[in-house]
Image (spheres, grey):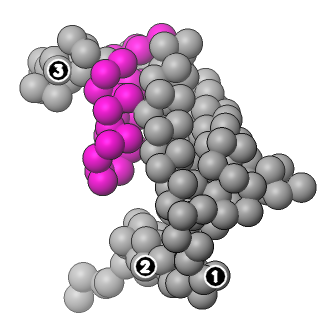
Amino acid sequence: MQAVTLFGYAFLSNVALAVLPHEPAVIWYGARLGVWPTTLVATAGTVAAALVDHRVFVPLIRRFRDASAPSQGATWADRFFRRFPFATIALSGLTPLPFFPFKALAFTTGYPLERYLAAVAARSAPRYALLAWFGVAVRLPTWLIAGLFVLLLIPSLRMLPWLRPSAS
């Protein structure tokens, strides 16, 4: 049952523009399920979310792009991504940067689904293995993991319109 819950949470914390942090959950489950089961289940949930995102957003982007004016040209990030797409996605897991800019580049450049899913797995598995190992090695108390969850959630809450400060 814990593996099913972790899969669902990994999916929800990675689908679309999710605001839920996955790090505390992977640390917590690492201590309970072990490093490799946690890594595999969390990666599978993340890849499932990536599949849904690709299936939903790529057609929307294509439709929107077809209806809009031609683009003004490629940015440096777009050019870099087009040259090294798999590496860009896979190595993004080593950065503290949010994943959505890399996801957006994959979708807007038409990066193929199978390669995108493989890159997401290559991005997620090492990150989750490290977090799960940390959970096993350190055994943080639940209250501290909950505090980490709240701390990591704070920046995401700015995205919610009803929590934005009013411009008066």
Q: Position of residue 11 (x, y in %)?
A: 66, 46
- Tag in front: 2 or 1: 1
Does label 2 or label 1 sit earlier along the sequence?
1
Q: Position of residue 1 (x, y in %)?
A: 89, 55
Q: Which of the numbered marks, if any, corresponds to residue 80?
A: 3
Judging depth in this view, the residue of 43 and 39 nearest the camera is 39
**123 sits left or right of 132 in the view:** left
Magenta range: 86-112
Dominant SS in magenta: helix
Do callouts 2 and 3 mark residues in contact (Cβ within 8 Å)? no
**In terms of image quadrants, where is residue 93?**
top left
Packing grade of label 1 (10 A; few <14, some 14-19, many >=20) is: few
32 relative to 124, above or below: below
Residue occupying the point 61% across, 32% down:
47
Viewer-closest of 11 and 164? 11
Identify the residue under disc 2. 151
Left or right of residue 75: residue 160: right
Question: Along the polypeptide, which appears first: circle 1 or circle 3?
Answer: 3
The amino acid on which the numbered mark 3 sits, given as a three-letter code, is Phe
* Cα gap from disc 1 to disc 3, whole angstroms: 41 Å
Instruction: Check the image and report above or below for 43 versus 23.
Output: above
Q: Which residue is mark 1?
A: 142
Q: Is residue 56 above or below residue 49?
A: above
**Res 158 seen here:** yes
x 45%, y 23%: residue: 119
